[in-house]
Amino acid sequence: MQKLLKFAFIFIIIISLSGGSIASKTLVNSNFKSNVGAPTVQFLSYTSAVNEGEAKNVGNVTNPCLPYVDKIVTVTISQDPSLPVTVSFNPSSGTATEGSTGDYTIIPNSFNLEAGNLSKDVIVRVYNDGYVEGDETIKLTYNLATLAGGDAVHNNIKQQHTITIVDDDFPPSSNGSINILYNDFNSKFNKLPGWQVVGGGGYPKTWEVMDFGPGNGLDPNGTPYLGIDGWQSGGYLDKVIETPSFNSLGMSSINLSYLEYFGIFPGDFDSRAIIDVWDGSVWQNLLTQNTVTGNSGSFKNPFKRSISIPLAYSNIAMKLRFRYVAGAKHVENVWLIDNFKISGTHHTTIKNGISLEPAQQYLGPFATTHFFDPVTGDLILKIQNFTAQDYGCTWVEVDRAGQDETTWFGAHKITNKTFKVIPTNNNPNGKYEITLYYRASELPNFNGAAIKSMGKTEPEVQQATLANSISEPVQLSMFNSDFAYTATFNSGFGGFGVSDAPAGDALPVTLSKFEGKSSVEGNVLFWETASEVNSDFFIVERSIDAKAFFNIKQIPCAGTSQLANRYAFTDSNLKNQVYYYRLRQVDQDGTFAYSRIIKIDSPITSQVKFFPNPVRSWLDIELQEMDSELFDVSIVNASGQVVWIGDKNKCQNGKLRLDLSRLTDGIYQVVVSATNYRQIFKIAKIQ
């Protein structure tokens, strides 16, 4: 063990003497002027993180549906330059979208560093939208400009600052398990995205990502882990590292798990390993280890720690801190952590009763937004905008409650529970899909075949007449034991409910599901009918603008059946663009009707091959004619969270090779990107 430690420390010392970390050296621009003795410009740090949820109590006068939180990023110059130097930010290569109605803005985007003004705190304003989009990144880089004779240059380190925006939105789930945070500390360049060593500093005086080589349980494949070493510090230690913040509100359970080796030397200083959780106001202790509790695990056999976090501590910006206190000088005094994971379960309840306050979210172009009651947190409805229309701040409420149905207009009935949608910028020619959620107890009798459409009245259902009301085909899907009704409208917003009124294009079959996804083989469509009467065939239609549709495939129906029937079709030979699909269901008497429209973003897949799939450890990716490129690779889990990042991977003989042995079992999305290049495909990970 001591040999492994000494080897690791010698390696770290060599890196330090050579001018910084391996990661920092890859950021050097070969076109930069020599910076020997010159004033050098750099970011103060490599990474930071911000949680969207931290913006909930921050007002935005110009757009109340997009509250924001300001993140400070500092740019510095090492000494007085001979002339002022202008620092201008480049467009970010991260996944977040810049703009006042996007994910963030930068204030200011350009500034001067000069004698007497050697640093600048830049505001990165992060907006809290209502989109379920997973964590996103802002990758800040800059250009320098100075007059002739100016001597300011880029430093060799800290030329990129990456901000991780932690999404605080979860998809509605009847009983969903969610991976909230995960870090195996194996990323090549950014091993601690969003983590913060309190007080700064470097190894061996504080926490660091370490790699002692293969041959032990923490890193059997030679991969790194997080650790701190009381022996090498040379004296007393009291050091803290904090995780990124995350939203734990609405969780029905929260769990922390990781591998650890906490080593102590008997009779030496009473070393302590402390884990606390931030409850929104104060730190609460979860675990304390010391000489009384004894060693936990070892190098070769780490302890699998699992801690249930009390739901009483749930808040929008929960985070954990690991505090290590030591004063010993023996090799056994260490605390090492790997495969850190925060997971939870999230149960969504459907809104019951009239809204006391309207829910409000920003509904932008081509956006999908869920609306939750601001008082109870219960789910109200979902809207998917199919157009470039910017509806702006949009208010949603349950404006009438009750069981079953009541009079709508004429002889037609509509549910007692109705919904109202009021956008800032309504569009009478809009195109959107809306899903209304009902508890089963709200529709004890008015359900099943009695419901034939979704009805809409402008401005609200209570003002219904034949002139201002329409009905559209509706599809039912189950939300646990409750109901979700979905329809597509080509009109403005107003009041909504489900109705017994016949829709002009009602489906001759009960279509219970119509979904699609992008795959390596193409766009895979699958649908299911709950029952069919005299049905003949389906025609799959495709469009690139959601307006003009073309037939691409005819598929026979089951005819007459009271059983569930499942259908599937794969559309291949696609371009890198968005496609829209709908089904035309034709009855045996020639009548027909359309399904709702679904959208699939289809990246090019013709230039990438990968194997094996399923994968146990090594994944090989073949990229045709891409030998000289540097590729960024990220892996996203089924919850939309990035669980593996590898930047600037060199393609060798047209092939990339990734070690995925530490991923847990499941389905993952692999994103490979470079200049003017992007490939997305899915893999299955098994043990």
Image: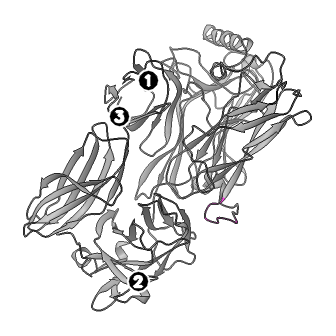
Viewer-side residue, 138 vs 334: 138
Quadrant in which the N terminus is drawn: top right
Q: Give the main secondary structure, helix, strand or loop, of the magenta stretch.
A: loop
Percent x, y for residue 284?
68, 48
Percent x, y for residue 641?
49, 42
In the picture as drawn, the residue positioned furthest to the bottom comes out as: 410
Identify the mark nearer the N-term, 1 or 2.
Answer: 2
Distance from disc 1 to disc 3, alpha carbons, whole Å, reads 13 Å
- Does the magenta run of residues contain 558? no
Secondary element under disc 3, as helix, strand or loop, is strand
Residue 647 shows which numbered tag?
none
Residue 683 shows which numbered tag?
3
Residue 658 shows which numbered tag?
1
Q: Of the residues shown, which amino acid type is indicated by label 1?
A: Leu
Percent x, y for residue 551?
20, 54
Residue at the image point whose x is 44% and y is 23% from the top: 659
Quadrant in which the C terminus is drawn: top left
Q: Of the residues shown, which amino acid type is indicated by label 3?
A: Ile
**As displayed, is residue 273 above or below residue 501?**
above
Colour pattern:
one colour
- Badge count: 3
Q: Of the residues shown, which amino acid type is indicated by label 2?
A: Gly
Viewer-side residue, 176 vs 412: 412
Magenta residues span 61-67
Label 2, on which residue?
A: 402
Residue at the image point whose x is 50% and y is 14% from the top: 215
Identify the mark nearer the N-term, 1 or 3.
Answer: 1
